[in-house]
Amino acid sequence: MALFRRKQTETAASEPETRAFPTPPPAPRPDGLRDFDEQRRYVLDLLNPLAPFGVSLLDAVGLVLNESIQAEQAWPASSIKEGDVLVRKGTRIHPRLVGLVAALGINKVITRPRPRVAVIPVGRPSQALAGGRDLASYLVAAELQSLGAQVWHVPGSAYDEPELAELIGDQMIRADLLVTTGGFEADEVSIEAVLSQIGVADTAPVAITPGRQQGFALVGDDFVPLLALPSDPVAAHILLVTLAGPATRKLVGADTVLPALERARVAQPVSVTPGLLTCAHVVASESGTLTFRPRRSGVDALVSINRANGLALLSSKDGHIDIGTWVDYIPLDR
């Protein structure tokens, strides 16, 4: 299906194309916000896995297996039977796994390439002379690299719309996914204005906090997907875990792209925003309780994120979660 639709007029052949997503985005709720799960599902459905290719076993380290590997026969003096799945599709190949696959007589495997991701910070014009540094972009780039992506962190920031448009355009040729940080605050270059010039974009607010301001776009002639994250490190990290991370897993064709959830009891009363999915960095104890860290900003926010080992997903109609309530959380140390 074409990503761009042409206006239906008598002079359509000579008129520019009207850009549109292949399917319409989710409808907003009565409060004007998009449901986060619906929005995430919509974005992930627009991403196509990268094409698989064959590679020698040693060169496959760090890549993701595209086909499960089964035992073709039973192994003597072992519990392995013919047909047992030894390595599942979607597994990232690590050095210890190479020995097992080699023992099966396999010298070449079918994999998917590491997603190429360009992380682009959006600047504040007031910081152009002060040498301000976008903290969120460093955090996002490092996390994506740890997930197996081949990451380019674009140095510096763009401080006006033409500069940002050019910066994004320069990265399209080498990226399977573009990620920007910033562009939603009043004193930042408007990411919405830039994306509307270079592609088809959706920057409607989503019912999640932090991270309500976010965006998705298909940019350039090749319709490269772009995720626009906020400049706040806490919000950016939350959307990294819940959205950008799953996007990279979708690109490598993983069967499961959403992060695994665990449940635990809250160790203290918690106040949340009614009607929104409220995310908070937490410390999960071995006894199965969650302790919440105070919301910080700047460098203190990065300290708080660094000390957390989980991301709690909270919702409440009245805004209150009592001590001992069971809640879902995403482990961060896996």
Image (cartoon, helix red, strand yellow):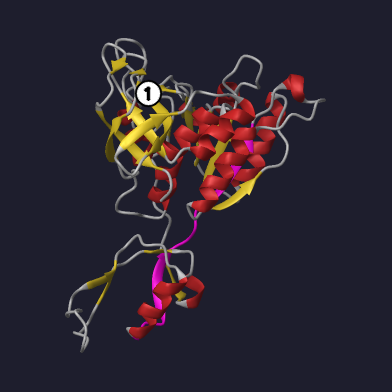
Residue drawn at x 50%, y 53% as measured from the top left: 115
Residue drawn at x 65%, y 22% as measured from the top left: 189
Viewer can see residue 146 = yes
Q: Relative to 117, is 29 above or below?
A: above
Residue 317 in which image quadrant: top left
Total numbered badges shown on the rendered structure: 1
At label 1, counting other C-alpha atoms closer than 10 Å, the crowd grade (few under 14, some 14-19, many 20 or more) is: many
Horizontal relation, residue 143 to residue 313: left or right: right
Q: Relative to 89, is 76 above or below?
A: below
Viewer can see residue 218 = no
Rendering coords of residue 40 (x, y %): 36, 33
Residue reaching furthest to the front: 287
**Front residue of 282 and 45:** 282
Q: Relative to 150, is 202 above or below?
A: above
Q: Is residue 108 magenta?
A: yes
**Front residue of 148 and 7:** 148
Q: Quadrant of the N terminus?
A: top left
Residue 157 in which image quadrant: top right
Q: Is residue 241 magenta?
A: no
Q: What span is in magenta?
A: 105-121
Rendering coords of residue 323 (x, y %): 28, 23
Rendering coords of residue 155 (x, y %): 71, 41
Rendering coords of residue 269 (x, y %): 33, 19
Residue drawn at x 66%, y 32% as measured from the top left: 134
User: Circle 1 is placed at which residue position?
Assistant: 278
Q: Amino acid at mark 1?
A: Thr
Q: Secondary structure at mark 1?
A: strand
Q: Main secondary structure of the magenta part?
A: strand
Horizontal relation, residue 298 to residue 334: left or right: right
**Front residue of 300 and 51:** 300
Residue drawn at x 17%, y 80% as measured from the top left: 82
Residue reaching furthest to the right: 129
